[in-house]
Each structure stands twice: as C-alpha cells, then as structure tokens.
Image (tube, coloured by chain):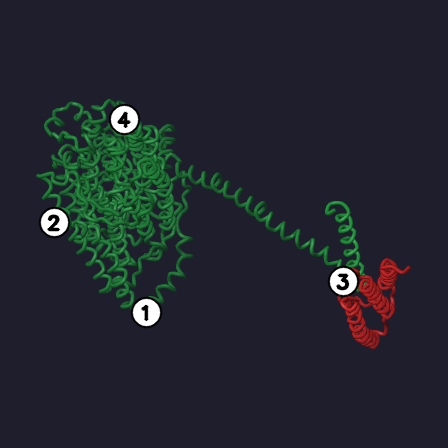
Chain colours: A green, B red
C-alpha cells in the first residue's frame, strides 16, 4: 500500500502547478495595484537605451582573467533585469503560491524518504512494481501504455529530486524576493519537478520520452525566466532568452538520436517496455542493438551536456541561480545519467562498444570541461563546467561497469554530487544576492569578489564543505563516490580513462579551491589567504537571510554524510545479479585510492599557494608574460573556441544551406508556379486577339470549322468506317 | 429527268455563293440578304429530300421536310424583321451600316 500510493509523489507537483497557474497566480496578478503596474511598464520601455549604452567594451579575446575592473555593465539597479522595485513586497497571492509549491514538495520529499527508509534494509523493491498503468492506444496488437513504476533505483533518484527541489524552493523565497513573476517561478519549478519525476517513474521508453521533452520545455521556461534581460557581450554572456533557446535546440539535437534509438528498439522487439525489450533483445542483430544504444546515448549526451553538445549548460547560467542549482544537481542533467542507468542492462547487452563509448565520452568530457573551468572568471560558469566534468565521471562510472558491478558507482556519484552541487550553486546564489544588494547591479565576476568569508561566514563555510566534497577530500561524500569510479576504471583495465579521471580529479580540486579563494579569501586573509582578505568590489556586503542559509546548512550536512550509505550499490542494482557493496576498508587500504587523494591534495595545495599568497594582478602578470601560458589561457578562457566554432557553423554552414534552400524555393519552386501562371497569362493575352469583334470573321471561323469537320467525316467514312 | 441530286447541287451551290457573299460584303443589308438566301438554299434541299424520299411509302407521310421548310421560312421572316430593325438602329446611332466598322465587342 505504501508503495502502491507512491504515484501521489509524481502527481503532487503537477497539482501544485495547476493550483498556482489557475488559482493563486491570477490572485496575485489581480491583487496588484493597476496604476503602478502601468508605470513600471512604461519605465521598462524607457530605460533600455541607457543600459545598452553603458559598460566598457572589452574585446572578447582579450578578456582578462585576473585584472580587477569594476565598471562593466554599469546598468541601473533593476533596469537591466526583471527586478521590479515596485513589487518588493510580494502580494499575498504570490506568497501563497510559494507555500503551495513548498507544501506539496515537502509532502513528496517526506514520502520519498519514507519509501527509502522502508526499502533500505529489505531491498523489497529491487525489481520494481507498477504503480499506475493507463492504456493510451491499442493499434495493431501493440499496446502504447503509459506505465509508471517504482523501484529502488527510482527511489534513490526520488529522494535526490524531491530533497533538492524542496531546498531550492525554500531558498528561492529569499533569492527571488525582488524578482517579478514570483508566483510564476514557483509554478515553473513545480512543472520542472513533475517532468523529472515522470522520467524517474517511467517504466517504458514512451513515458521516459514524454518526461524527457517535458524537462526540455520546463528548463526552457526557467532558463529564460528573466525574459527582459539583455545579453552582455563584454562578459561573453548571452541573454536569458537566447540561452533558453540554445539549451532547447541543443537538447533537440540529442533527442533526434534518442527517438531514433527508441524506434529501432521498438521496430525490432515490438515493445517500449524496458523489461520486454531486454527479454527480446537477444533476437536483435548485435550491431543494430549497439547502434540503437548509441543513438539512445545521444539523448543522454544532449541532456547531460556531454561533449560535443555541452555548450548549452554554461549558457543556461543565465537563468535564476536556484534554477541552475536544480538543473545541475537534480533534475535536468541527472536525467541523462539516470536514463543510461535505467537502460544499463540494454547497454551491457550491446557490449562491449556501447558502454566503451559511454565511458570514453564521459572521461573525455570530464577532462575537457575541467581544463576550461580552470580559467573561467564567471563565478557560476566555473560551476557549470564543473558540473559537465562531474557528469563525465558519472558516465565513466556507468561505462566501465559490468553487470556484476551494476550502475552503483555512477549512480552513487550522481547521488552525492546532487547534494554538493546544489550546495555550490545555492552558495554562489547567496554570494550573488549579497553582492547585488551591495553594488546594486548583477555581479558574477570573481574579480569583483574576494574576502567575502569574513562578511558571510555561513555561506563561506558551507561552500568550503562543498569544495572539499567535490574535490574528493577524504571523509567527504565526493571522496567515496569519485574514488570508487576512478578505482573501477583501473580495475576494469581502462588505463587511458583511469589517467584522464585521475588528472581531472587534480584539476577539479584546483579550480574549485581557486574559485573559493577568489570569492571568499585572498592574499592577506587568515589561514594563508583561505579566509577573508581584501574585498575587490564596493558597497557593504551582508550575510544572506535565513531562508537562504538554512538550505545551505542542510545541504552541507548531506554533502558530508551522503557518502556513508554503504548499501547503495546493491540498493540501486537494476541487473538483478548480486553486486558487491561499497567497502570502506578495501577502498582505504587500496594504495591507488591514495594516489587519487594525493593528486587532489596537490591541486588543492597549488590553488591555495597561488591564490592565497599572491595578488590577482600578479598572477595575471605572470601568465601574460609567458607566451605559452598566455596562449593556453586564451584558448581555455574561450572554451576551446567551441562556442565560436558553433556560431561559425551556424552562421556559414547551417545558414548557408538554409540560404541555398531559400534560393531554391524562391527561384525554382516559386519559379515553376509563377512561370505556369505567367505562361497562361501571356497565352491568354495572345489568344484574345482572335476576338476581333467583326461578325464576318466569326462566321468564317464557324463555317471553316464545319467545312474541316465535313472533310474529316468524309475521309473517315470513305476509309475507316467503311 | 429531275433527280434528288439536282436539288442537292442547286442547294449547295446557292448556299456556297451566298456564304461567300455574307462573309465578304461590307454592307450589313447585303450580309443579311446572303443569310436569307442561305436559309432558302437549305429549304431547297429539305423539299428535295422530302419529295424524293422513297423509304416511306405514302406521300402524305413524307411531309417532315416540307414542314421544316415552312418553319424555316417563318423563322427567316422574323429574323429579317429583327435584323433590319437592328441595322436601322445602328445606322441611326453611327451613320454607317458597314459591318467592318461595327466591332465594338472586340478584345
């Protein structure tokens, strides 16, 4: 009964969405004073000129990591985004909207934890049960059913999704306080969670694809939430509208592969159901199965932002920061990993090359994104690339696995990563919120931060916990999950992947501590520059309100202790084979684990020494004075010019083809149509001269025709019809 | 010996001569005269067919052609009246009855 009713978790968020959209949001809108709304709109129309003219233009390539400059984007407070000073006090309707969403999410969260605790010891739901089934279509003896199931893999994911969502919603009370569309924001969040839960509960490919597209839609809505905000070319930042479009289109590219893969499987096995497909999969040509699984993996590449479809994720930073936390930790990018884990038996049936591709793409992306993150100056963008990198780890964890090990390592990293990545983003949001209040403009550049630890200690200490967790510092959750993956790569004889993940671990430690010191520490701070130091911005910075710090503290606790769930591997086991559990003693006794730890420490120590001891200007000077470092820095800072390349590709190749097609349409297709019309018109113009108006010419024509017919008849009579 | 062929040849020759006249004459009255005689040429053939039809036994049963001839004469009379009225009307309006100049309904 407890398990059967779990579909209420799935439908709770969509119910909240409906209530907010049709109930409390209209209430909020109607209760606002009309006149004020009108003036603020007039202001919005009047102000854009000012913002567009402001700002010192920096050529994109010369954009410099370590130089302090504080005059970019000097828009007026509230003029450049959807922040409306006139709605500072949120109306009752908006408040109620947020409470509806949070209450529903609290219910879902508690229910998920109850499910987790009740199944944890017994592993009762390892094979999963169907909780809701609806026969959508029945065509030609094939059922197209909407079926939702719950199993332990799903429950593990449920806990992550609902907990992070609850934290994000609670946090947004503070963060979105001054933003327009407060009620709308909560409705979108609910929709987003619902979409993700559809994926989590899916029992067949039909349902997961529906959830997949819903996630795409709701992320589009949320990334582009501040629809009036403009792009900032001097910071290489697109506008939210562009960013949302980019993420939507990038995901579509991956989805083409996904749906093709689903169709290949369906055509060959006659079912969408995971288990039925798995039962019939041996009848398929193994090469075809491999192709189908690679196509399905394309969907995961798009959704989980793996190379080469990763460029949407840094752009998605233009959404509100709580949304970034939700996208990066629990809902969107995790969907790709979850899908691969869910279909892992199919991937391993298509062995070996399907899983090898998964692992290789993951390892390459992990390394590739980590190198980019080394030099990024945008606070949120560092986190974006770290997410891409960590997702790469998860794919490595699944890719190097075998049915005897299961999806445990990859999913375990997803589980722990969700908590510390949410914490990192919410902490970053806390910093941005504080700086926004101090400088009265949006600041995301680490060069305008520094020494914030002494001003906002709770944010700093929780952020440090997350940094240590993501760096794999022994004892924190990230240590267990990450070392497990790295160790597994070596154990399964993938030396290249092992080396890449190992180096990435060092890079991760370096860039995360670098971001921490740039924001919270600096030369002259305590503990060798780790804590406090000179503040490079201006204005008075204060700690964020309690609505924002409480989720940080809760998530920090999770970031430490999520790694101590030793039964995780057998808990999420989808293959049914007995799998070994995470054994702390073996892991700690393995010397190779300590190789990874030492490399992470080297990264941490290097960042500490460089950024804690020296001024930004000095480091920058050193980098710029060395030709090799300067070139490397420029390449990395411009993200290997992949965005530039895609822009070029779009501009010249895609638009070129489009131009050719347009020319073909305008000149050939339209030419045929217009040509026929023109010909008929001209023929008519010529033919009307027969109409002379003279009676006698008509008469001549008439009798001439009769004469000709008569001649024809005579000939026919005398020859053919004889 | 008078045969059907004599009637037919006379009708055809008369028809063709007056057709030529109707097509070539400039004067509307002359064209009208041509048409009238074309009709009468047809009448000759009708009557000829009627008279020499040997398929049907009784003479009284061979009247179809003659009745048609009478119809055509009637219609021709009406036609002549209408056409002459039109010619007079056109003459009053345009001071001419040259059919070459009466071409207002061209393209």
* Label 3: element kind: loop
* Label 1: element kind: helix
Q: Nearer the viewer, residue A304 or A283?
A: A283
Mark nearer the viewer, 4 or 1 = 4
> Which residue appears at 63% of the width and 50% of the height?
A676
How many residues crowd around disc 3 within 10 Å: few (fewer than 14), some, or many (20 or more)? few
Mark with earlier residue (2, 1):
2
* Chain ID, mark 3: B
> Which residue appears at 42% of the width and 53% of the height?
A53
Name the spot of residue A131 as percent of width and height, x first: 18, 47
Mark with earlier residue (4, 2):
2
Q: Which residue is mark 3?
A: B56
Q: Point out the residue furthest to the front here.
A: B57
Rounded to the nearest angstrom, the CA distance separating label 4 from label 2 is 45 Å
Q: Which residue is mark 2?
A: A1
Q: Which residue is mark 4?
A: A497
Rounded to the nearest angstrom, the CA distance separating label 2 from label 1 is 50 Å
* Label 2: element kind: loop
Mark with earlier residue (4, 1):
1
Q: Quadrant of residue A395?
A: top left
Cβ atoms under marks 2 and 3 closer than 8 Å: no
Mark nearer the viewer, 3 or 4 = 3
Q: Which residue is mark 1?
A: A34
């Amino acid at each position: 009964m407890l398990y059967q009713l779990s579909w209420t978790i799935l439908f709770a968020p969509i119910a909240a969405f409906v209530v907010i959209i049709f109930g409390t949001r209209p209430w909020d809108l109607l209760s606002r004073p009309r006149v004020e709304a009108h003036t603020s709109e007039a202001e919005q129309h009047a102000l854009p000129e000012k913002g567009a003219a402001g700002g010192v233009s920096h050529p994109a390539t010369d954009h410099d990591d370590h130089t302090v400059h504080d005059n970019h984007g000097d828009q007026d407070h509230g003029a450049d985004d959807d922040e409306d000073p006139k709605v500072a006090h949120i109306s009752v309707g908006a408040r109620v909207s947020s409470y509806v969403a949070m209450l529903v999410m609290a219910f879902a969260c508690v229910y998920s934890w109850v499910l987790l605790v009740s199944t944890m010891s017994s592993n009762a739901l390892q094979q999963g049960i169907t909780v809701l089934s609806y026969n959508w279509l029945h065509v030609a003896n094939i059922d197209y059913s909407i079926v939702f199931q719950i199993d332990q893999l799903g429950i593990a994911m449920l806990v992550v999704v609902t907990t992070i969502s609850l934290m994000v919603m609670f946090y947004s009370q503070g963060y979105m306080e001054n933003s327009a569309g407060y009620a709308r924001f909560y409705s979108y969040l609910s929709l987003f969670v619902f979409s993700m839960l559809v994926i989590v509960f899916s029992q067949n490919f039909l349902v997961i694809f529906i959830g997949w597209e819903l996630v795409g839609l709701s992320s589009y809505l949320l990334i582009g939430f501040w629809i009036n905000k403009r792009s900032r070319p001097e910071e290489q930042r697109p506008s939210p509208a562009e960013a949302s479009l980019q993420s939507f289109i990038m995901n579509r590219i991956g989805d083409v592969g996904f749906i093709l893969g689903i169709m290949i499987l369906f055509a060959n096995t006659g079912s969408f159901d995971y288990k039925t497909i798995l039962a019939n999969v041996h009848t398929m040509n193994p090469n075809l199965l491999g192709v189908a699984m690679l196509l399905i993996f394309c969907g995961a590449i798009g959704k989980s932002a793996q190379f080469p479809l990763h460029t949407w994720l840094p752009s998605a930073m233009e959404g509100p920061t709580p949304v970034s936390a939700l996208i990066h930790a629990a809902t969107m990018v995790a969907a790709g990993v979850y899908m691969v884990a869910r279909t892992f038996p199919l991937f391993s049936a298509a062995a070996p090359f399907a899983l090898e591709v998964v692992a290789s793409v993951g390892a390459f992306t992990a390394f590739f994104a980590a190198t980019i993150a080394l030099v990024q100056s945008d606070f949120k963008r560092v986190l974006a690339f770290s997410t891409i990198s960590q997702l790469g780890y998860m794919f490595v964890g699944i890719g190097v696995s075998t049915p005897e090990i299961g999806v445990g390592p990859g999913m375990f990293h997803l589980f722990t990563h969700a908590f510390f990545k949410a914490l990192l983003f919410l902490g970053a949001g806390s910093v941005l919120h504080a700086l926004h209040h101090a400088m009265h403009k949006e600041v995301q550049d680490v060069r305008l931060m520094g020494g914030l630890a002494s001003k906002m200690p709770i944010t700093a200490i929780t952020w440090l916990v997350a940094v240590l967790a993501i760096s794999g510092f022994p004892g924190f959750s990230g240590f267990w999950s990450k070392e497990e993956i790295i160790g597994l790569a070596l154990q399964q004889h993938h030396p290249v992947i092992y080396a890449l993940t190992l180096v990435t671990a060092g890079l991760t430690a370096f860039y995360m501590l670098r971001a921490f010191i740039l924001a919270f520490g600096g030369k002259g701070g305590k503990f060798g520059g780790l804590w406090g130091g000179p503040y490079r911005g201006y204005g008075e910075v204060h700690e964020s309100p309690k609505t924002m710090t409480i989720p940080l503290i809760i998530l920090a606790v999770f970031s430490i202790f999520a790694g101590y769930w030793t039964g995780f591997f057998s808990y999420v086991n989808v293959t049914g084979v007995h799998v070994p559990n995470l054994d702390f003693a073996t892991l700690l006794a393995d010397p190779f684990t300590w190789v990874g730890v030492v490399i992470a420490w080297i990264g941490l120590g290097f960042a500490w020494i460089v950024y804690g001891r020296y001024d930004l200007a000095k480091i920058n000077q050193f980098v710029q004075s060395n030709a090799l470092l300067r070139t490397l820095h420029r390449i990395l800072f411009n993200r290997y010019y992949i965005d530039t390349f895609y822009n070029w590709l779009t501009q010249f190749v895609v638009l070129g083809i489009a131009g050719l097609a347009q020319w073909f349409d305008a000149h050939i297709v339209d030419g045929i149509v217009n040509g026929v019309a023109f010909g008929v018109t001209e023929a008519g113009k010529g033919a009307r001269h027969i109409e002379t108006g003279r009676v006698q010419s008509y008469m001549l024509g008439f009798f001439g025709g009769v004469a000709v017919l008569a001649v024809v008849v005579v000939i026919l009579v005398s020859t053919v019809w004889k | 010996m008078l045969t059907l062929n004599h009637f037919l040849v006379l009708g055809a020759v008369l028809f063709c001569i007056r057709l030529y006249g109707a097509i070539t004459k400039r004067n509307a009255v002359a064209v009208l005269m041509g048409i009238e005689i074309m009709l009468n040429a047809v009448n000759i053939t009708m009557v000829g067919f009627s008279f020499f039809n040997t398929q049907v036994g009784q003479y009284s049963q061979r009247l179809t052609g003659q009745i048609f001839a009478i119809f055509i004469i009637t219609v021709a009379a009406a036609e002549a009246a209408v056409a002459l009225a039109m010619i007079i009307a056109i003459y009053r309006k345009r001071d001419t009855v040259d059919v070459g100049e009466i071409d207002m309904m061209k393209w």
